[in-house]
Amino acid sequence: MAEPFTARVRLATYVVDLSGIMDKFAEEEMMHAYEMVAARGAKRILLNFAGVPEASSAGLAILIALLRETQERGQQLGLFNVNAHLSQLFEMIGLLDYVSIYETEEQALAEVA
Amino acid sequence: MMQTPQPDTEPRALQRQVFQLKMLLDVLTEVSGSETFSRMLDGVLSIFVGTFGASGGAAFWFDEAEGTWRLAANRHLSEERMREVKAWLEGAGGERQQPHVFASGALLSLPVRARGQTVGVIGLGRKLTRQPYSEEDQRLLTAALQQVSLAVEKSRLLELTQLKDEFLSRTTHELRNPLIAIEGYLELALKEPEAVSEENRHRFIATALESAHRLHRRVDDMLNVTRLELGREELLCKPLDLRAFLLQVTDEFKPLLKEKRMKLRRKFTASPTVKADAERLHQVVTNLLSNAVKYSPSRSTITVVLTTKQREAVVGVQDEGIGLSREDQRRIFEKFFRSDTVRLRNIEGTGLGLTIAKSLVELHGGRIWAESAGEGKGSAFYCSLPLL
């Protein structure tokens, strides 16, 4: 028997494509992008790390700051297309206790409710 | 005492150690590359937060002018945690010199030491992993903060070098001006009798002499500072009736005050005797009075105060002049320091007089300090000397 037909509407999910090394110079651009989607009422924010090969400690601090902001505003944060090295760093600092990593954009969009 | 940890051979643990050691390099880069002190602090704080996955962090710095701790940088440390750090800093038990992990485990405080004292403190919030800060974490963070301490020292040295450069330039200017005046007026005075009247010749010589005195005072200031710095100044202390002494010194200023149409008020409420080198103390009081005259408008009043407080005699010189900002009050006794107000008004001086006064008062076992309600609101300089 075929799966029942479902029609799922996902409002206010925003995808932010990131590109470049995430270091202290990334802060302005990151926070600007975040404020832009937050101002539009984003409830779920997905960060696409496909273009990010590396992150410095200051770059990780930006992610932590972003996590704090989304928590305070009741928003859900997810990451996808994260390379193995960055994934290990995120795990090491405990970020993954609060944020999920998805392999692809499709998976992220499907999972983030 | 912290133990040197044994190296962990687990790949993940090694990765963590490499990442944390990289922090030292990041901090070094930040410290050497930041354009301003506040940017450096913010950068270092970010590195700490990112490396240890701290939920937030803040830096506090001691404001010497206010005598309080101020928030210098903040990366999402909650108000509650900030209050905890401040309470720890201001709590009983004296100066904080060692890292401190709070009982809740939610906070780590790290003192920044420079010039032999705690000048700042970094507070880090709970780790996202909820693991406590280990001794190894504290060791690494303390090592990183040593770079910050060096930067603080370096900025201080840089400031001192700039002050010295400025002093040299100003001193050259100030020595050259009287010399030019001496040369010029002596040349005029030496002209043929038919070219210059006897009255003018006398006036030219008197002006040249005044310039020579000014030059003499400048050179004396510089020699005095050098002698005091080298510890070569020796006092010839004898019991001194401070009231009689102050009457004499203030009397000496009457002609100058009359010339400037200024009033002198003496409020002597005690007649203390102190053990002092009268010549050196004369230099101190003269300096304070000269400054009061120099930086006050005509028709204003200069008040000289003499009183006793506990086991000290207190001498004060109060004026209605240009006043001092909080920053000026904090720095006014520093060598070569001249306030912006003084610079902008092109008031001459080497910026050494109060440094000399401070050293001389301290040689007597006393203290010297400045008070002012702000710029344009007058100043008061006080010095205290132990009673005999």
Image (spheres, rainbow, N blue to C red):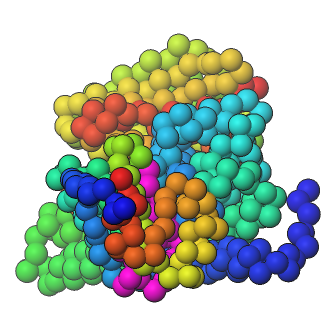
Q: Nearer the viewer, residue A40 or B65?
A: A40
- Horizontally, residue B254 falls left or right of residue B67, namely left
The residues colored magenta run A48-69
Quadrant (top left/top right/bottom left/bottom right) for the N terminus of chain B: bottom right
Report the front residue among B38 and B122: B122
Q: Quadrant of residue B253?
A: top left
Camera-side residue: A46 or B183?
Answer: A46
Q: Specify whether residue B145 is in view.
A: no
Residue A22 point in image, percent of width and height? 42, 77
Residue at (54% x, 29% y) in the render: B315
| Image height of B317 relative to B35, above or below | above
Q: Residue furthest top?
A: B269
Number of callouts = 0
B136 shown above or below B7: above
The structure residue drawn at horizontal position 48% and vertical position 29%, both measured from the top left corner, is: B316
- Residue B335: x percent and y percent? 51, 61
Residue drawn where x is 8% and y is 80% of the image: B195
Asked if the magenta segment contains residue B138, the reply would be: no
Q: Could you tell whether B289 is left or right of B141 in the image?
A: left
Compared to residue B278, the image places residue B302 above or below, namely above
Q: Position of residue B126 (x, y in %)?
A: 63, 48
Residue B269 shows in this picture: yes
* Residue B67 image-quadrant placement: top right
Q: Is residue B288 left or right of residue A41?
A: right
Q: Is residue A59 magenta?
A: yes
Q: Please name the residue shown 55% across and 65% down the image.
A: B50
Q: Quadrant of the C terminus of chain B?
A: top right
